[in-house]
Amino acid sequence: MNTLTQPDQRTAAGNGGGAQRVSFITPVANILETSDGYLLEAEMPGVAKDGMEVTVENGELVIVGRRGDKDLPGTAIYRESRQLDYRRVFDLDPSIDTGKITAKMEQGILTLSLPKAEQVKPRRITVTD
Amino acid sequence: MSLIRYQAPELSTWSPFIGLSTLRDEMNRLFDVSQPGFGGREDRLLGVWSPPLDVFQDKDHVFVKCELPGMKKEDIQISLHENTLTVSGERKQEREVREGDSYRSERFFGRFHRSVTLPVPVQTDHVTAQYKDGILTVSLAKAEDAKPKHIEVQVA
């Protein structure tokens, strides 16, 4: 499963007719491939379960995480985090059974399980006499 | 207005990539806006995890927020010493990688340590912390002396 480096800026039409630039944070991710499928974990702190959008289209897996956390009250005196939503696109391995993808969101980590289709799993064939 | 001392990420071991990394950071910033300046992929090269940290204040409180996705509450330590708040802990890799599996890893596992000097004195017995959706928020009540005071001006 390859990672596509997509541009992080999207153009969305604003109300006033002018184009508005929306930028996203590319979440860091770990991908584990086993003979049964893939396991993807992406870091999206600040995103709750209902802020997650996972879509599969044209052989691409798109994950979008919208932050549910608000900025802290008061005024910022020191700031390193960025209050932006997350987005990342992955190329899907054709062997993945897209109907069986499951997702879980826990403490800012999205865990996707992407099982491979039965016919592509390695299979041991017993030799008979 | 107070200045807050910047604490560089703690380096676990000497790394020959420090100089290179600085140059690399600059190069990356030219093309890549997706990574935060702190806690980004650059840190991985140095073998440190420096989670992004924010400090906010209102009239009565100081708030410290730290992005720590995928931790266990028990693995986060918070301490306050002479007006320096320290958040530290360890994120453990629990995923088992068997032989024959292939793994691509961008996430950092291991220890982290962040310290920040608070802008005003706080009441050490009025500190609360919450960990939700991978974000740690610490609320600290300002010491009475440090709160802004409203003084009535009496016009004779």
Image (cartoon, helix red, strand yellow):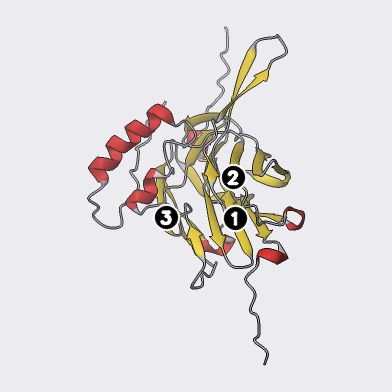
Residue A90: numbered disc: 2
Judging depth in this view, the residue of B109 and A38 nearest the camera is: A38
> Which secondary structure, mark 1?
strand
Q: Residue at x 37, y 52 (%)?
A: B48
Residue B112: assigned label: 3
Q: What element carries label 2?
A: strand
* Residue at (70% x, 54% y) in the render: A103
Marks 2 and 1, the one that precedes in the sequence: 1
Helix, strand or loop at mark 3: strand
| Quadrant containing the N terminus of chain B in the rendered view | top left
Chain of the residue under label 2: A
**Is the Cβ of the residue at disc 1 closer than 8 Å to that at disc 3?**
no
Q: How many numbered circles are shown?
A: 3
State whether discs 3 and 2 lie on one chain.
Answer: no
Task: Tell me the CA gap for discs 2 and 1.
Answer: 10 Å
| Chain hosting mark 1 | A
Residue A105 visible in the snapshot: yes
Q: Quadrant of residue B140?
A: top right
Q: Mark 1 points at which residue?
A: A40
The answer to the question of whether label 3 and label 2 lie on touching residues, with beta carbons closer than 8 A, is no
> Which numbered disc, 1 or 3, marks the residue closer to the eye?
1
Residue placed most toward the observer, A128 or B75:
A128
Q: What residue type is labelled 2?
A: Phe
Which residue is the extreme one toward the bottom? Answer: A129
In the rendered image, the quadrant that contains the C terminus of chain B is: top right
Can residue B82 be seen at all in this image of the molecule? no
Residue sitting at the far right: A99
Binning the other alpha carbons within 10 Å of mark 3 as few (below 14), some (14 to 19) or many (20 upward) gives many
Q: Do the residues labelled 2 and 1 touch (CB within 8 Å)?
A: yes
Picture coordinates of residue B33, whole percent (x, y): 47, 30
In the image, is residue B122 above or below residue A128?
Answer: above
